C-alpha cells in the first residue's frame, strides 16, 4: 500500500442511543471523541492524484491489521483510532463533555448576517449579555467583517471596536473569543480579557500571531479559508476538498507545535463558505468526522450562511434559521463539539433535544 503519510481514516456507520451503546459493549463500535456518537467502521482513504482510493472496513477488521502483517499501516491505524476516540480536554477551561455554543457578536457595520445592528459598543455588549442568558458558552467578538467581498479595516479601528466589548463581557463573566486575523488585535483583546483567539487564517495571516497565542496561553480556533475575503469566492479549486483541508490542518498543527502551541489548546474549523462552493461545502459537511483524526476539538460555523439559501429557496440571512439548525445537527451527528451560531436560544433548544435522543 502507499506510504502512511497519504493515509486518512473517515469514520462510518455512525450511530447514537441504544444502538451505539450495544455496539460499543460488544466491541463492534467505538465512541467518537468519547461522545454520544459511535462508529462501527471507517473508510481507509489514499490519494491517487485527485482521486480517492477507498477501502471500507469494520472496526474489528481495522484493529486486526497487524495480523495481516502490515506493521506500518497497523501502527498508523492504531494512532488514528486513538485520536478519533479520545475525549478532548477542556477548551479554554470549558469542558467538552457536551455540545457547546459559541455566540456571535459582530461589532461591525457590514456583517453579512446582521448589518450594523450591533456596531456600537453599547449595542454589542447588550447583545452579548443576551446571548449569555440564552445559553452561549462562548462569545465570539469580531470587529472586521470577513464575509465574501469584504474589505479589510485598519488595525487601530478594529481594536477600537472590539476592546471595550471584550472588556465589558469578560468582566461580566463571559468566556470571550476574539475573532481576528491581526496579531495586534489579538494582543489587545487578550489583554482586555479574551481567552480564545478565532483566526480565519489559522494563524498564518500575520507572522506575529503564533507568538502572541503561544505566549498568552490562550486557546485558538484554526479555520480553513482558501484565498482571502475579498476574492475567496471567485474561483475556489480543490483536488478533494475534505482531504485538502485535512492536509492544511495537519500543516498548521505542525506550525503551531513549532511555535509552542500544544494541540490541546486548538480547535479546528473547516470554514464552511470560506473559499468554497456548494459542492465543496457539502462534501466537507458529509466528511466532518474525518477531522477527528487530527486529535483536536472540532468547531463548526454554518449559521445563516448563504449556501443555506442557495440549497433552499433563496432565503436571505434573516430567514435561514431552519437550515442553520439542520446543518448544526448534522455536525453533532458527526461528533462536532462546538457550534458557532447567531441564534443561540433556538440552537440551544435544538441541541438539548438532539442530546436527549442521542443519549437515550
Image (cartoon, helix red, strand yellow):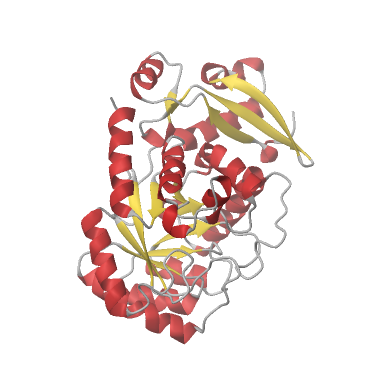
User: Percent position (x, y) of residue 179?
Assistant: 44, 67
For the question of whether residue 287 can be seen, the reply is: no
With 225 as the anchor, is 125 left or right in this view?
left
Residue closest to the far right: 49
Residue closest to the far front: 313
Residue closest to the far top: 26
Q: Considering only vertical position in the picture, is 354 above or below 208?
A: above
Residue visible at 34% across and 65% down?
Answer: 195
Residue visible at 31% across and 72% down?
Answer: 124
> Which image quadrant: the C terminus?
top left
Residue visible at 38% across and 18% down?
Answer: 19
Residue visible at 59% across and 33% down?
Answer: 9
Q: Considering only vertical position in the picture, is 279 above or below 52?
A: below
User: Percent position (x, y) of residue 41?
Assistant: 54, 23
User: Percent position (x, y) of residue 341?
Assistant: 39, 55
User: Percent position (x, y) of residue 321?
Assistant: 40, 50
Is 318 or 206 nearer to us in this picture?
A: 318
Count the marks. 0
For the question of whether residue 176 can be seen, the reply is: yes
Q: Give the quadrant of residue 152.
A: bottom right
> Which image quadrant: the N terminus?
top right
Q: Considering only vertical position in the picture, is 346 above or below 138?
A: above
Amino acid at each position: 500500500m502507499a506510504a502512511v503519510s497519504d493515509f486518512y481514516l473517515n469514520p462510518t456507520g455512525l450511530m447514537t442511543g441504544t444502538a451505539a451503546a450495544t455496539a460499543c459493549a460488544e466491541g463492534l463500535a467505538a465512541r467518537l471523541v468519547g461522545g454520544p456518537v459511535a462508529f462501527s467502521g471507517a473508510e481507509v482513504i489514499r490519494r491517487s492524484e485527485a482521486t480517492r482510493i477507498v477501502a471500507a472496513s469494520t472496526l474489528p477488521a481495522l484493529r486486526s491489521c497487524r495480523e495481516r502483517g502490515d506493521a506500518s499501516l497497523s501502527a498508523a491505524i492504531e494512532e488514528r483510532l486513538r485520536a478519533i476516540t479520545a475525549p478532548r480536554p477542556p477548551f479554554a477551561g470549558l469542558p467538552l463533555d457536551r455540545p457547546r455554543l459559541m455566540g456571535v457578536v459582530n461589532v461591525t457595520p457590514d456583517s453579512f448576517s446582521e448589518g450594523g445592528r450591533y456596531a456600537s459598543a453599547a449595542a454589542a455588549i447588550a447583545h452579548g449579555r443576551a446571548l449569555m442568558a440564552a445559553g452561549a458558552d462562548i462569545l465570539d467578538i469580531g470587529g472586521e467583517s470577513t464575509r465574501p467581498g469584504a474589505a479589510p479595516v485598519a488595525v487601530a479601528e478594529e481594536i477600537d471596536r472590539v476592546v471595550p466589548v471584550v472588556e465589558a463581557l469578560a468582566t461580566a463573566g463571559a468566556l470571550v473569543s476574539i475573532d481576528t486575523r491581526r496579531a495586534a488585535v489579538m494582543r489587545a483583546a487578550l489583554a482586555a480579557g479574551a481567552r480564545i483567539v478565532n483566526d480565519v487564517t489559522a494563524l498564518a495571516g500575520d507572522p506575529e500571531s503564533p507568538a502572541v497565542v503561544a505566549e498568552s496561553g490562550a486557546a485558538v480556533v484554526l479555520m480553513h479559508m482558501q484565498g482571502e475575503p475579498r476574492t475567496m469566492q471567485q474561483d475556489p479549486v480543490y483536488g478533494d476538498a475534505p482531504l485538502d483541508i485535512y492536509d492544511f490542518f495537519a500543516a498548521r498543527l505542525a506550525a503551531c507545535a513549532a511555535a509552542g502551541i500544544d494541540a490541546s489548546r486548538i480547535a479546528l474549523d473547516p470554514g464552511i463558505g470560506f473559499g468554497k462552493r456548494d459542492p465543496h461545502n457539502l462534501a466537507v459537511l458529509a466528511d466532518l468526522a474525518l477531522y477527528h483524526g487530527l486529535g483536536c476539538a472540532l468547531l463548526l460555523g454554518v449559521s445563516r450562511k448563504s449556501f443555506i439559501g442557495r440549497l433552499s429557496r433563496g432565503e436571505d440571512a434573516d430567514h435561514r434559521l431552519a437550515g442553520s439548525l439542520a446543518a448544526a445537527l448534522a455536525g453533532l451527528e458527526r461528533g462536532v463539539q462546538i457550534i458557532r451560531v447567531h441564534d443561540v436560544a433556538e440552537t440551544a433548544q435544538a441541541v438539548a433535544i438532539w442530546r436527549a435522543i442521542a443519549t437515550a
